[in-house]
Image (cartoon, helix red, strand yellow):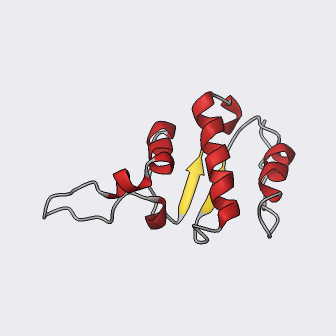
Amino acid sequence: RIVYCTVGVLLRMLVCPKEEANVSFSQQQSPPPLSLDTISHLILDEVHERDVNTDFSLTLLRGLLASKQCPHLRLILMSATASIDFFRDYFASVTQVPPASLEIPGR
């Protein structure tokens, strides 16, 4: 399941997982609850912007990946200008498998 949301919604899912899982839907719409347990891939774009919400989200996600609570979760970070080595090293210290990276040259 892929969910497109803002960093604010992601933070709410990370900080209050039980509250987000209790979201009720009508009988016609019954997707699974919105929680990290139901998401296979999480894509964060513009991680180079380094605002408080993004930094806090990355900190919580790093802890989540270290705890093995969501072994199915794949984290994808995208940025046009960020250092690949910085983010790879940040997450490599908590994962057993080194994070993969892909660099697409620009203009």
Instruction: Residue 31 in the image: state x and y as whole percent.
Output: 29, 64
Q: Is residue 28 above or below residue 106?
A: below
Instruction: Residue 92 in the image: state x and y as whole percent.
Output: 82, 58
Q: What residue do we see at 85% from left, 51% from top?
A: 89
Q: Is residue 43 above or below residue 79?
A: below
Instruction: Residue 78 in the image: state x and y as whole percent.
Output: 67, 45
Instruction: Residue 18 in the image: state x and y as whole percent.
Output: 38, 56
Q: Is residue 28 above or below residue 11?
A: below
Q: Report whether 20 appears left or right of 96.
A: left
Screen quadrant of the N terminus = bottom left
Please count the marks in the image.
0
Nearer-the-camera pick, 2 or 17: 17
Q: What residue do we see at 52% from left, 66% from top?
A: 40
Nearer-the-camera pick, 77 or 34: 34
Q: What residue do we see at 57% from left, 67% from top?
A: 70
Screen quadrant of the C terminus = top right
Q: What residue do we see at 62% from left, 63% from top?
A: 74
Q: Is residue 35 visible?
A: yes
Nearer-the-camera pick, 17 or 98: 17
Q: Residue furthest left?
A: 27
Nearer-the-camera pick, 105 or 46: 46
Q: Is residue 45 visible?
A: no
Q: Report whether 49 appears left or right of 95.
A: left
Q: Report whether 84 appears left or right of 32.
A: right
Q: Residue 34's image quarter?
A: bottom left
